[in-house]
Image (cartoon, rainbow, N blue to C red):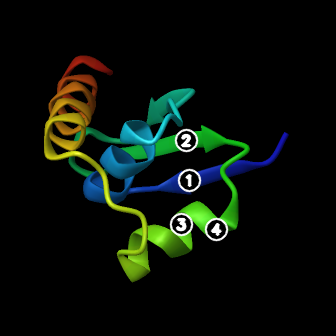
Amino acid sequence: MSEYVTTDLQLSSYLKAIGHEPVRVEGPRDRRRFVFVNVPAKHIADYHEGSRPVAPQSLFAAYRALKRRVFETV
């Protein structure tokens, strides 16, 4: 089980919107790290290349959910 860790809220929102749920959120409140498992490198590349569009509603819902987790997690 490989882990992918990022501090990028937008990338994390994208991953969540396409079906990857973070297994945990860690680190200090001002620099949270989102930890995902089994994220194909292609999905990261798709985000950076803009080659896999996501419905805006899904992306915004994922963003709001992750932002809530940032402030709830201690």
Q: Quadrant of the C terminus?
A: top left
Label 4 CA crowd tier, 10 Å (few <14, some 14–19, many 20+)? few
**Horizontal placement of 49 versus 35: left or right?**
left
Q: Residue at label 3?
A: 44
Element under disc 2 = strand
Mark 4 vs 2, N-terminal side: 2
Q: Residue furthest right?
A: 1
Give the image location of residue 60, x and y in percent.
14, 39
Label 1 CA crowd tier, 10 Å (few <14, some 14–19, many 20+)? some
Count of numbered circles in the view: 4
- Label annotation for residue 42: 4
Say which of marks 3 and 2 sits in front. 3
Indicate the amino acid at tag 3: Ile
**Residue sitting nearer the eye, 67 or 41:** 41
Q: Residue at label 2?
A: 35
Mark 3 vs 1, N-terminal side: 1
Separation of disc 3 and disc 1 at Cα? 11 Å
Separation of disc 4 and disc 3 at Cα? 5 Å
Mark 1 vs 2, N-terminal side: 1
Give the image location of residue 61, x and y in percent.
18, 30
